[in-house]
């Protein structure tokens, strides 16, 4: 059960009940205090309706509940929230491509980076935001040419950065790819801001790791081109 939505429904009903009671109390007060007014009963009803409408709109404006992800709306909201940025594009990934997922979305960012947002069947109460950092052939060749010490140092630095990011990750050696995974639980508490923040966490971590790899390669190339003088 999505307790966030249950709380939302109960709270809305409570507010509505208070408005009805308040409206009835107001009408009772007006009828008691304005017995000398020549007002038709229908006008009392119209006044009550107007009063309730104004108060209800005011309550919605000031106490609106944010829309949150749950098992019923996850696919629609993930797509809608991602595409709110017109520079970001999404495409549905078919069941034949990802049979283990209830739904999958491929996401492309302005710089050409890609990630996938999915809801796995095995963990159907979760949304997974996954990005695979593919090591291109040129970089892979350069990384494989690192000394054992330099390779171990880079691996340690990347691992430390990934641990700090609090993402789940897999390092596929020897320097094939790095998989980043951020998981969101469908408990009815994840807002648009939280979801997009999780996506940004994956993308920013990916950029940091790729930059670390580039720096290590440039450092190694510089050292090779400029051997120490004896």
Image: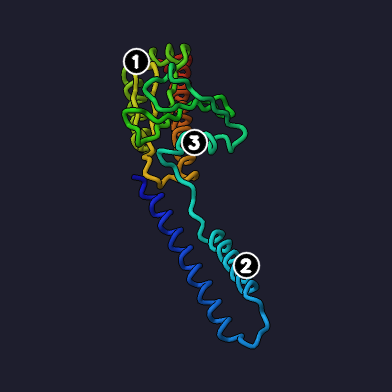
Tell me which numbered mark, 1 or 3, is placed earlier along the sequence: 3
Residue 229 in view of the camera: no
At 57% across and 67% down in the image, what residue appears? 52
Report the disc number at residue 174: 1
Residue 137, how many percent across, how many down? 46, 11
Image: 58 above or below 34: above
User: Element under label 3?
Assistant: helix
Report the disc number at residue 78: 3
- Closer to us: 92 or 37: 37
- Closer to us: 141 or 87: 87
Left/right of residue 62 with respect to residue 141 in the rendered view: right
> What residue is shown with label 2?
50
At 49% across and 47% down in the image, what residue appears? 67
User: Element under label 1?
Assistant: loop
Q: CA distance from mark 3 to mark 2?
A: 38 Å
User: Element under label 2?
Assistant: helix
Report the disc number at residue 100: none
Q: Quadrant of residue 68?
A: top left
């Amino acid at each position: 059960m999505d307790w966030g939505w249950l709380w939302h429904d109960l709270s809305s009903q409570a507010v509505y009940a208070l408005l009805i009671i308040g409206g009835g109390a107001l009408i009772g007060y007006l009828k008691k205090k304005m017995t000398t007014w020549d007002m038709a009963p229908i006008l009392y009803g119209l006044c009550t309706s107007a009063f309730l409408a104004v108060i209800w709109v005011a309550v919605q404006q000031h106490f609106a509940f944010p829309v949150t992800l749950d098992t019923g709306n996850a696919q629609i909201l993930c797509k809608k929230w991602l595409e709110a940025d017109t520079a970001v594009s999404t495409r549905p990934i078919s069941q034949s491509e990802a049979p283990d997922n209830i739904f999958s979305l491929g996401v492309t960012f302005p710089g050409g980076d890609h990630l996938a947002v999915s809801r796995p069947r095995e963990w159907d109460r979760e949304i997974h935001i996954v990005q695979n950092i593919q090591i291109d052939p040129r970089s892979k060749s350069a990384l494989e040419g690192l000394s054992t010490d330099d390779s171990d140092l880079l691996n340690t630095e990347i691992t430390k950065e990934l641990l700090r990011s609090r993402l789940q990750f897999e390092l596929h050696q020897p320097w094939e790819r790095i998989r980043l995974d951020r998981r969101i639980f469908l408990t009815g508490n994840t807002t648009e801001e939280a979801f997009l923040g999780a996506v940004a966490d994956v993308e920013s971590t990916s950029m940091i790791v790729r930059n670390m790899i580039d720096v290590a390669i440039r450092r190694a190339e510089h050292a090779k081109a400029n051997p120490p003088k004896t």
